[in-house]
Amino acid sequence: MPIPSSKHDNCFILAIESSCDDTSCAVLKNNQVLSNVIAGQKIHEQYGGVVPELASRAHQSNIIPVVHAALAQANIDKKQLSAIAFTRGPGLMGSLLVGGSFAKSLSLALDIPLIEVHHMQAHILAHFIDHGQEMPEFPFLGLTISGGHTQIVKVNDYHDMEVIGSTMDDAVGEAFDKSGKILGLGYPAGPIIDSLARKGNHDAFKFPIPKAPDLDYSFSGFKTSVLYFVQKQTQKDPDFIQNNLEDICASIQYTIIEILFQKLNKAVKQTGIKSVAIGGGVSANSGVRERLLSKQEKGWKVFIPPFEYTTDNAAMIGISGYYKYLQDDFSSLDIITQARIPM
Ligand code: KG4
Ligand code: ZN
């Protein structure tokens, strides 16, 4: 861990995350989190997915209370802040605009630097939030698994990352959420499937492993196979879902984990890097965590984030901002948020 130079001692960063449907603000002192406030948006549950227009509106009403709460919990006055970090992208444009515009205004009003952060890099850099744990050493592999992304990343340095595999269609979080929708579960279905799967038999039903080139992933065919399977079974037995829900969830989750780890194993072999860190909402999954932990027997060094830093949060934006702050890597005020942005 680099020790901050005296110039950067007691650096206070306020970070804002608004890329999807969580409005979050965190305050960090150097690499430690003083507060990390997240306002989720229940409004989307009734639609079975995030409605972008509604997400932007909710960010507008949440952002000021969330920022006030983060400052209050950190017991910091805004005049003490050293810089403002924010998610520039990728994400939903309307959502990013709310956080981005707020961050710019605050940076201008307080006359302190503005720092743009890449949301997917932040999911990986969450491992550098200091809570007394061991941190990965460069280079390592990052498996970023969320509602919008599925990537294997070679992490050379804090902001030097190379995507070596990614999904060609749906993200793994979508595979969970869309399977859940087929089964009539709530949104997001990932955590629901996770808890039902724990009580089921993962060998009960078989789903095919999709074929994708090299280190890339594909999940759209998997979702379709779940749909056809459920349609076929419910034609024979209208109560099929109800009578087999735990086994169906266990089998779905097991297959998704197989898909993830077949490519991750390949990436470890190809790169020779045996140090692996997971990040993103799906890294909260108990089966994914167990599978990664079991790899320690094969000599892997594994890094699993605490639950509060798996799904979207501003603390991960803050730690990413901190490492840019140490290098005086600031953004100009004419920076624009971007729905798509390369790593
Ligand atoms: O990282 P995240 O909060 O937002 C994006 O950047 O997309 O990830 C959200 C995704 C959703 O698809 C949700 O179903 C999934 O993470 N998720 C889970 C679990 N917790 C959240 N998937 C499987 N098991 C979980 N325990
Ligand atoms: Zn995310």
Image: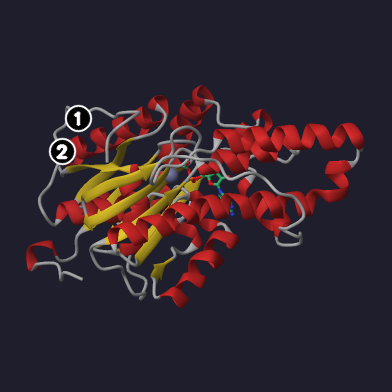
Q: Nearer the viewer, residue 107 or 224?
A: 224
Q: Residue at x 62, y 40 (%)?
A: 177
What colouring does the structure picture have? secondary structure
Q: Quadrant of the C terminus?
A: top left
Name above or below for residue 337 compared with residue 171: above
Pick the residue in front: 257 or 182: 257
Q: Is residue 199 above or below residue 233?
A: below
Q: Secondary structure at mark 2?
A: loop
Q: In the depicted view, which residue is nearer to us: 322 or 141?
A: 141
- Mark seen at residue 335: 1
The residue drawn where x is 70% and y is 52% is: 251
**Residue 75 lies in quadrant:** bottom left
Residue 192, visible in the rendered structure = no
* Residue 41 drawn at (x, y percent): 56, 38
Amino acid type, mark 2: Ser
Residue behind mark 2: 331
What residue type is disc 1 on?
A: Ile
- Specify whether 267 is left or right of 175: left
Left or right relative to 112: residue 249: right
- Helix, strand or loop at mark 1: loop
Quick check: 227 left or right of 51?
right
Q: Visible in this render: residue 320?
A: yes
For image coordinates 11% across by 54% down, the residue present is 327
Label 2 packing within 10 angstroms: few (<14), some (14-19), many (20+): some
| Position in image of residue 195 (x %, y %) | 69, 57
For mark 1, does the 10 Å Cα neighbourhood hold few (<14), some (14 to 19), or many (20 or more) residues?
some
**Compared to 12, does 88 lie above or below?**
above
